Amino acid sequence: MEELRPLDDIGEEDLVISMGPQHPSTHGVLRLVLKTRGEVVLQVTPHVGYLHRALEKIAERVNYAQFMPYTDRLDYVAAMNCNLAYARAVEKLLGVEVPPRADFIRVIMAELNRIASHLIFFATYGLDLGSLTPFFYGFREREGILDLFEMASGMRLTYNYIKIGGVWKDLPPGFVDKAYEFLDYFLPRLDEYDRILTDNKIFIGRTAGIGILPADMAIEYGVTGPNLRGAGVAWDIRKDEPYCGYDQFDFEVPVGKGEMGKLGDCWDRYVVRMQEMRESCRLIRQALDRLPDGPTMGRVARVMRPKAGEVYVRSENPRGELGFFLISNGSAKPYRLKIRTGSFTALSVLPEIAKGWMVADVCAIFGSLDVISPEVDR
Amino acid sequence: MEGTEIYNLVKEMFTGPVPGFSAELDPCIEVEPVGIREVAAFLKGEDHLAFDALMCLSGVDYGERFGVVYHLFSTAHRHKIVLKVLVGKEDPRLPSLESVWKATAWFEREAFDLYGLIFTGHSDLRRILLPDDWPGHPMRKDYVYPESYHGVPV
């Protein structure tokens, strides 16, 4: 049977390449060990933990409200969403009612941050694949959102704005007008993005049909968010387990359709995020239109002592399901806080979908998962 | 399906290894370590249960014992259940569920890394977040921090 062995098995040696921890396409600090044969990747082994800051251990040492700034550092390009997810977990444990105005403000902030996060994805994904312009465009538009956040919270990256029970302060004067202005400015930009990248022949060549993640494999690995929707599964926590009054708004859940290549390829995961930005704009506009009056903070004690119990609360973040498993023993500090992040599970599926592709495709596949290292390592 | 219904189905199938149930906040079934793999496979395999997704796997130090908490979800029926396994501190071993949900592979590595829980049958039980030569398992409540790591004060 010796002569029937495939040609590439003969006289070739496998080469092991370390990609990262410092590599332009790793978006943070992450190391991928590639076993290659020529240009083909046989095996990918991610090594994570470079940004491990023991957030879960810290949570056991500080009280419930004090942990909020740490959630900003979980996924620092979507800090509002992380604030919101943590606040919801503690609120469920405490049984706190959030006033309607605070809920609307939360939706506005969460969706603005979703756009900002997807803009970073758009910017860096273009860059990963050799297109420089999206990088400038994406970061330019993101500035408009950061200006809005700065108005409301005083911060441009880590906001600490959404608090347990509501939001820190009411919207400042002029915020609503400025938010409308941003939407009017931003929507035509999305069409421009489509012309420059989405329908770009070279970009389609680099992403369509590459790194296919089928729906059953995605579910098996716990992959959530846009990566799961890119595989054609219409699963969105905002829609299916509504919180913050998301059920009062009219929005679609975009899913991948395999338009350019195969269902669940890199292009599908990319285009889902581009469409989600449009849906987020719709959500923000509806929330601004119908913004109710009233208080922005519920009745919360200064030092919270939730009664003993265990809850798991999950929210739809730009990078998938962000879940907080929170155990209280009745004291002012969490007994245990486990953070389940979308990036962690998305990265765990990479070895499965990246093998068999070229080294250059690994950048395309990894980029399309939109993994962010601080969220993996916590 | 409601938590109690799911518990009753599990109870019917496995009399021994399912000692407890609580529905206070999230419905939670307590399972003995010996039976966890069978219970998990049952919950995933039955058509009317179909728990195809593992949302979260967490190690917990409950003081007397260690716990592993599995949060399960069914994408077909949109229902949820929590499984909890308690293991003794002297020999914290329990079966790996890698053969049931592939998502557990990394979650179990994390629980091993931070709590020192041994998941038997795991294909690649290495540390994941901490350096390979880090002393001990820091999420344990009785963990004593080292003075330094490779000459760097901690």
Image (spheres, grey):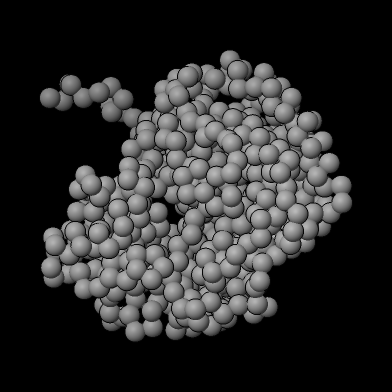
Picture residue at 14% right of the left edge, 62% below the top = B12
Q: Which one is nearer the viewer's eye here, A17 or B2?
A: B2
As drawn, which residue projects farthest toward the top? A201
Q: Would you place residue B18 above or below residue A259 in this image?
A: below
Picture residue at 13% right of the left edge, 70% below the top = B16
In the picture provided, is A234 more to the left or to the right than B86?
right
Q: Would you place residue A326 above or below residue A74 in this image?
A: below
Q: Which one is nearer the viewer's eye here, B7 or B73?
A: B7
- In x, y percent, where is residue A171? 79, 54
Q: Is residue A283 visible?
A: yes
In the picture provided, is A153 more to the left or to the right than A209?
right
Q: Is residue B124 visible?
A: no
| Quarter location, residue A1 | top left
- In x, y percent, where is residue A256? 47, 28
As drawn, which residue projects farthest toward the right? A173
Picture residue at 19% right of the left edge, 54% below the top = B42
Picture residue at 77% right of the left edge, 61% below the top = A169
Counting the numbered discs, the total is: 0
| Quarter location, residue A279 | top right
- In x, y percent, where is residue A287? 69, 43
In the picture provided, is B118 more to the left or to the right than A225?
left
Q: Which one is nearer the viewer's eye here, A275 or A306?
A: A306
Q: Which one is nearer the viewer's eye here, A236 or A365?
A: A236
- In x, y percent, where is residue B107? 39, 58
Q: Would you place residue A229 above or below residue B148 in this image?
A: above
